[in-house]
Image (spheres, coloured by chain):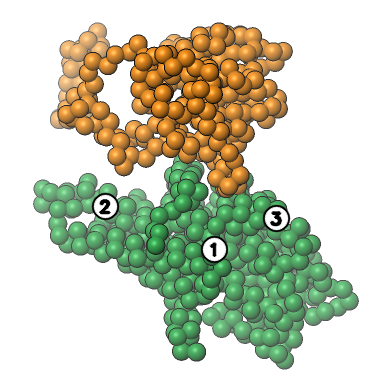
Chain colours: A green, B orange
Amino acid sequence: MEFGLNKEQEMMRNTIREFALNEIEPIAAEIDENATFPVDTVKKLGELGFMGMTVAKEYGGAGMDDVSYAIAVEEISRVCASHGVTVSVNNSLVCWPINKYGTEEQKQKYLIPLARGQKLGCFGLTEPNAGTDASGQATIAEKKGDKWVINGSKIFITNGANADVAVIFAMTDKSKGTRGISAFIIENTFPGFSLGTIEKKMGIRGSCTAELVFENMEVPEENMLGKEGRGFGIAMSTLDGGRIGIAAQALGIAQAAMDASVQYAKEREQFRKPLAKFQAIQWFLADMATEIDAARMLVYKAAFDKWQKKPYTVSAAMAKLFASDICMNATRNAIQIHGGYGYIKDYAVERFYRDAKITEIYEGTSEVQKMVISGALLK
Amino acid sequence: MNIIVCIKQVPDTTDVKIDPKTGTLIRDGVPSIVNPDDKHAVEEALRLKEKFGGKVTALCMGPPQADDALREVSAMGVDDLILLSDRAFAGADTWATSYALGMAIGKIEYDLVICGREAIDGDTAQIGPQLAGCLDIPQITYVKNVEMGDGKILCERALEDGYEKIEASLPALITVISDLNKPRYPSVGGIVEAYREKEVKVWNAEFIGADQELLGLKGSPTEVRKTFAPEPKGDGEILQGSTDEMAKQLVTKLVDKNILR
């Protein structure tokens, strides 16, 4: 049994850590405060190959392994969870399904620029009345000649307003239920496409969350992703991988909360000694460290399973369930250690706490992860 | 334009501790990195290659694990990787190291050699100048800007109070300072390529045709009498009182120390 990283993964971690500290951390508080999407750093991440890490070289990616990808999202999220999710969505929810289900033409046209970071992608599944129950899709696609005409809307779409390309889902045959859902690759320039509400969020405020509106949007028939009626399966398998990215994001936020807590505990003095000398604080830190280590093993294990082409639906669900849960613990206790200073924006733990919550919600709530895990046990 | 960049793998001295008894570095558990100035050398070589074409070769003398340093600069974009590694090189001071590097470079076609100003573990800044001497080519040290053309190189050489412009014919050697550029990050694709596709050529003393007497400890005129850790600086002094009072105290102290007159 081997717990260490290989040389490639180590260099990857060092590289992304340095990039995150030098390029992302200096703007993290600002993009959170102003809710601005960090166009420049996302572009730089793309140029360095972080937007399509596991895509093969011939399709614009780097051919990197999934553990390295999880490490990259972790390290990025350690300084800024908004950047973390932006990278995760493009890799997991856009590049991955096009790579897996796309035709050669689709890969040439969409995957290459997406993996190179020349274009940004988003994933449109959630609707006002189809959240956890994604089968209740109200977006309708009708075939008219050699085009699909799509009507409906998608909400809470990460990268929404900045994306050039989206993988979306719509009912092509309502009578067939989930077997009537199909996937499409669309562009933000297609006639009938528009942006709706840009959400004002509690956390990950530097990532853009938008509504996509389709009014008689014309989509060429060759832009259907996978076969007609297979969209639900495509969405679910895509989210399996996405959960590794979000689990890694949660892990990174938790690590950041602990790092900040350790530093603060050593510096801050009360009763004429550093906080670190109080057992109450030591116990917080010990719990954080233990939980973070356990989460890291689950996250890397899920990524390893995916890399090794083993089933990873359950391991990814476990990783996300656990990592998001301990991320809440770590960020909450980080604020407790910081006391009043943790409650104000001068200290980053305030942001970490707000950023943490979403990891229990998107790409499948914690309750959905439990459904997936228990479902596999009880089938 | 064929460029050779000399790089060194060094312990990350931001992390390093010194054994108070022996005065030597405690290397256990200290990560190794590419010497920071050398990354600026690599960056400049890559920029010149992008402008003028050609090839960039990284040359590193060190133990087998220095392989990682070469692969890191490969991930930045360096084409060829050569590790100069042999027990015969062990214990070399800067003189013997310069000789070995010079003999290795003698086996490569080149127009320009770029070195970092100095390594963070030794701080001598001697390799570049000595290597130029071994190769018998012109040298420009402390370079902060580079222009090239017509078989010549024109550099700005940093001085304490300004800079001087120096022109040299090629082939030449320059040593660069960190003001010169901002080194690029290794790319994900570059990292994959560095470990899966690139070969690090290992050259030994025999291959470079070096005289064994001039290598390693035997070839090193430097004799280390003693190494010691500098005394840690005492705690800073915090002045008390109103702003005016503290300013007066500060001036008095600076005058006492002859910093102000």
Q: Is residue B29 above or below residue A327?
A: above
| Residues indicated by labels 1 and 2 sit on the same polypeptide chain | yes
Helix or strand or loop: what does disc 3 sit on? helix
Q: Residue at x 45, y 80 (%)?
A: A373
The CA distance from mark 1 to mark 2 is 33 Å
Q: Where on the picture, by quarter, is residue B19?
A: top left
N-terminal of the pair, mark 3 or mark 1, is 3
Q: Is residue A73 above or below residue B28?
A: below
Residue A262, numbered label: 2
Q: Which residue is label 1 attached to?
A: A307
Q: Residue at x 70, y 25 (%)?
A: B52
Q: Position of residue B150 (x, y in %)?
A: 72, 13
Q: Which residue is label 3 attached to?
A: A59
Q: Is residue B203 above or below residue A370?
A: above
Which amino acid type is shown beneath numbered disc 1? Trp
Q: Nearer the viewer, mark 1 or mark 2?
A: 1
Q: Residue at x 71, y 85 (%)?
A: A180
